[in-house]
Image (cartoon, helix red, strand yellow):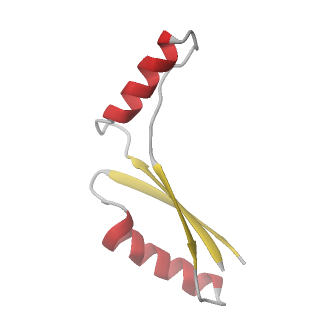
Amino acid sequence: MKATVLVRPKPGILDPQGEAVESSLRHLGFAVETARVGRLVELELEAEDPERARDELERMCEQLLANPLIESYEITVAP
């Protein structure tokens, strides 16, 4: 089972990479209001039950993949 986890800074949290990307895009002439930089984690799981896989992914995010204090995450599971 394949899964993706999108991790990004929560709104209001300082995002220096996002600010650098935003500034650079503006300097290149692009009309960008804001930019946020996150990371995408792709996983292949040995699971058959999507609900169980999602629960396991939640634990992965809370324990390692994201810092819940300053980052949010979105999980997508594809059979």
Q: Quadrant of the C terminus?
A: bottom right
Seen in the picture, residue 19 relative to 72 is either above or below; the reply is above
Q: Quadrant of the N terminus?
A: bottom right
How many circles with numbers are drawn on the protein?
0
Q: Residue at x 40, y 75 (%)?
A: 60
Seen in the picture, residue 15 relative to 60 is either above or below; the reply is above
Q: Nearer the viewer, residue 37 or 49?
A: 37
- Residue 30 located left or right of residue 39: right
Q: Residue at x 29, y 51 (%)?
A: 70
Q: Nearer the viewer, residue 7 or 68?
A: 7
Q: Position of residue 28 (x, y in %)?
A: 54, 12
**Quadrant of res 64:** bottom left
- Residue 38 located left or right of residue 32: left
Q: Position of residue 12 (x, y in %)?
A: 32, 36
Q: Nearer the viewer, residue 6 or 21?
A: 21
Seen in the picture, residue 33 relative to 66 is either above or below; the reply is above
Q: Residue at x 45, y 23 (%)?
A: 22
**Quadrant of res 11:** top left
Q: Position of residue 67 (x, y in %)?
A: 30, 59
Q: Residue at x 37, y 26 (%)?
A: 19
Q: Position of residue 57 (x, y in %)?
A: 48, 75
Seen in the picture, residue 33 relative to 7 is either above or below; the reply is above
